[in-house]
Amino acid sequence: MSKRIVILENIRSAYNVWNIIRTADSLWREVRIVWYTPSPIDNPKVCKTSLWAENTVWLRQFDFTIDAIKEAREMWLEIIAAELTENSVSLGEYVCESENWIAVIFWNEVDGVMAKTLKEVDDVIEIPMQWIKESMNVGQSTAIFMRELRKRK
């Protein structure tokens, strides 16, 4: 049985969170909500727009990203951050030891994954961008990562 977790670090928009939860439902993921990311536990906007997917996806809340990472390490998961950095690897070229046992950290759209979080991950992976923008909406990025990693298994 595979274990794939999405960790949402400081996502600002409830609508992005519901989008990610619904995508996680269709692709068999677990979701960890960190810091001030809106949660279906205490934010009615997330519940209303996720159309009850929050009831079918295993959700957990953490105050700090390091606690979500610690939980993932205890499950022997490879931990990657979805972020554009000087040393990031393209998602298309990325090879991990086991796509079935992985946790992916997604970011706040303004500030990205926190620097202290990047120090704790095994790899930093980016979605190659073709034009002017360096990133896309976090909901779209999460869906691309989930689908790409799922099809490699």
Image (spheres, rainbow, N blue to C red):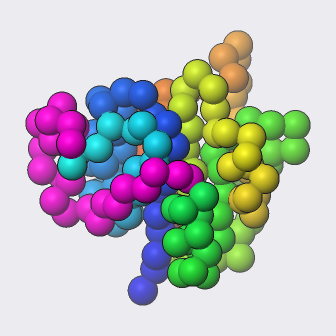
> Residue extending furthest front?
63
> Residue extending furthest top?
132
Q: What span is colored magenta in the figure?
A: 42-65
Residue for point 80% across, 37% down? 85
Res 49 visible:
no
**To which quarter of the image does residue 98 belong?**
bottom right
**Which quadrant: the C terminus?**
bottom right
Residue for point 65% across, 64% down? 79
Q: Position of residue 132 (x, y in %)?
A: 70, 13
**Which quadrant: the N terminus?**
bottom left
**Residue 9 located left or right of residue 36:** right
**Residue 144 located left or right of residue 132:** left
Res 61 visible:
yes
Residue for point 37% across, 56% down? 61
Which is nearer the eye, 125 or 120? 120
Q: Is residue 131 above or below residue 109?
A: above
Residue for point 54% across, 32% down? 108
Q: Position of residue 41 (x, y in %)?
A: 21, 49
Q: Is residue 9 above or below residue 28?
A: above
Which is nearer the eye, 60 or 101? 60
**Residue 98 located left or right of residue 63:** right
**To which quarter of the image does residue 131 belong?**
top right
Q: Position of residue 94 (x, y in %)?
A: 74, 58
Q: Is residue 91 above or below residue 79?
A: above
Q: How many numbered badges does the structure rendering display?
A: 0
Q: Please tell me whether residue 54 belongs to the stretch shown in magenta.
A: yes
Q: Please tell me whether residue 150 belongs to the stretch shown in magenta.
A: no
> Residue extending furthest right?
86
Q: Is residue 100 above or below residue 59?
A: below
